[in-house]
Amino acid sequence: MGVLDILRFIVQHPIGRKHPLRNVADFARWQLASRVAPGPILMDWIGGIRVAVERGMAGITGSLYVGLHEPSEMGFALHLLRPGDLLLDVGANVGSYTLLGGGVAGATVHAFEPVAQTYERLLRNVRLNNLEGRVTCHPLVVGAAPGVVRMQTHRDAMNRVMTQGESLAGSTEVAMTTLDLHLPNTSPTLIKIDVEGFELSVLEGAHTSLSRAAAVVIEVSQHREAVLAALHSAGLTPITYDAMTRTVTAHPEPRFTRGGNTLFVRDVDWARERCRTAPRTVIKGVSL
C-alpha cells in the first residue's frame, strides 16, 4: 500500500477520520521511527496494551494509525467478548485479535499461528502484556485433518498453505491439527478465521466447534459458496456491525467488508445485547 493509499485509509476510516491530523502525524512519526530504530519498536495501542512493531507488519501498523485496522470486525470482537469467554484465533499473525480478546476484553484465547517467525512475534506480544495465564499459543496450521502441510513464510499477514506443484522457495513444513481434535469439548464465544484461502479446510475440521460457537469472524477468499453453506448449516446468521453505534444488523445474505471479511452469530438478539452493554474503550481519542 502506497503513502497516498494509507493517508486515504486514515482519513476515510470511521475512527481515523475523527482526528485525522493527529492520526496522519502518528503515521509520519512511525514512518520516521521505523527507519531509524534497529529493531522492533514498543508502541502503546489500546486499553493499556503494548505491541512490538516492525516495518512490514501491515495489520498492526494499520491499527496504530486508526485504532482498529478492521473497525467492524475488531470492534465486534472487542464489544462481544467478556472475561471467561473463549476466543479461538485461527491465523493469529502477531496477535491483533488475541490482544484485543485476551488483553482488553479479558477473554481466554487459543491462538494458532503456524509460521515460526510470526509465532515468535505473537509470543513476544503475549509476554509483553503478561497474558501467558490467559492466552495459549499454538504453532500449528488448523485444517480438515491432522497431518503436515507446506506453508509460505515470507509474506507476513499474507502467508498461506501452499498447493501441490508450487515452488518450495520461501516455505516450510508445518504440523496441522483440527479445532475439534485439538480443543474438544469447548464452546467458543468467538472463532476468528483469517487463513488466506484455507478457510473451508478449517471449517471441515471444526463441525463440533462451529456448532457450539456463538459467533464467527471469517475472511472468505476462496470456495465462497461452500464456506457460506458450512456456516449456514451450523445455524449461524450473517450480520453487519457498526462499531461506532454498536448496531448489529441481520441480513439474509452475508455482507463482506474490505478484505472479504464477514460476521456470523447464532443468536442475533443476544449479540445485540452483548455489544450494547460492553464497557467503553477509548481508541485514538474516540470512546467506542
Image (cartoon, rainbow, N blue to C red):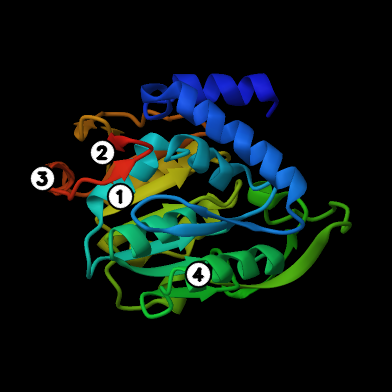
Q: In this view, does 255 lie above or below 275?
A: above
**CA separation in Å, label 1 and label 3:** 14 Å
Q: Is residue 61 left or right of residue 23?
A: right
Marks 2 & 4, CB-CB < 8 Å contact: no
**CA separation in Å, label 2 and label 4:** 24 Å
Q: Which of 219 and 100 is in front in this view?
A: 100
**CA separation in Å, label 4 and label 3:** 32 Å
Q: Nearer the viewer, residue 150 or 208?
A: 150
Q: Quadrant of residue 31?
A: top right
- Give percent across and percent down for residue 24: 54, 27
Q: In this view, does 225 lie above or below 81?
A: above
Label 4, residues with CA under 10 Å away: few <14, some 14-19, many ≥20: some
Q: Of marks 2 and 1, which one's residue comes earlier in the chain? A: 1
Residue 279 in view, yes or no: yes
- Dot 4: element: helix
Q: Give the residue type at disc 4.
A: Leu
Q: Quadrant of residue 284?
A: top left
Q: Nearer the viewer, mark 4 or mark 1?
A: 4
Residue at image mark 4: 128
**CA separation in Å, label 3 and label 2:** 16 Å
Mark number, residue 78: 1
Q: Give the residue type at disc 1.
A: Leu
- Give percent across and percent down for residue 73: 38, 41
Q: Give the residue type at disc 2.
A: Leu
Q: In this view, does 232 lie to the left or right of 202?
A: left
Q: Which residue is drawn at 55% across and 63% down?
A: 143
Residue 91 in view, yes or no: no
**CA separation in Å, label 4 and label 1:** 20 Å
Q: Of marks 1 and 3, which one's residue comes earlier in the chain? A: 1
Marks 4 & 1, CB-CB < 8 Å contact: no
Residue at image mark 3: 273
